[in-house]
Image (tube, helix red, strand yellow):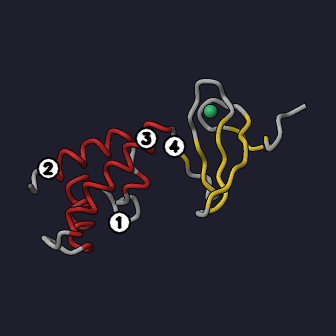
Amino acid sequence: MAAKGVTDRTCPDCRSPMKENSSKYGRYWDCTGPNCTWRMKEDGTGADRPTRAARIRAHIVFDALWRRGTISRDEAYHWLRKTMDLSEEQGHIAKMTKEQCELLIEKVKDWY
Ligand SMILES: [Zn+2]
């Protein structure tokens, strides 16, 4: 018998079944694989824990850039897309890989 809450969703990374959870942001699914930290959102996008942690770090340093008022939020996102060579659609930290997040953090440091 499957563990409680385990769904028919399959981890895109390791193919293990995923367990449903929810937060104030909506439902999400965690991989039950023993060495896997993949988490999937309702829209089917997901990332492992190191990627999620990198995105959080990248958001903190990037948001500080426009929150300080040095440049506007729109300008900051324009700079992000240009610097990271990303399209309008892809130019979001939530869509970046861990490596892209780390690169972005380095690039933001040039502003300081
Ligand atoms: Zn997995």
Tag 2: amino acid: Lys
Quote the CA–CA distance across marks 2 and 4.
25 Å
Quote the CA–CA distance across marks 3 and 2.
20 Å
- Left or right, 72 with respect to 51, comes to left
- Dot label at residue 26: none
Q: Which residue is mark 4?
A: 47
Discs 1, 2 touching: Cβ within 8 Å: no
Q: Residue 110, percent across and down?
A: 10, 51
- Left or right, 1 with respect to 85, comes to right
Q: Which residue is mark 1?
A: 88
Tag 4: amino acid: Ala
Residue drawn at x 91%, y 31% is 1
Quote the CA–CA distance across marks 1 and 2.
22 Å
Discs 4, 1 touching: Cβ within 8 Å: no
Q: Which residue is mark 3?
A: 51
The part of the image, by quadrant, that contains residue 36 is top right
Callout in the foreground (1, 2):
2
**In the picture shown, does residue 49 fall above or below 85?**
above
Quote the CA–CA distance across marks 1 and 3.
21 Å
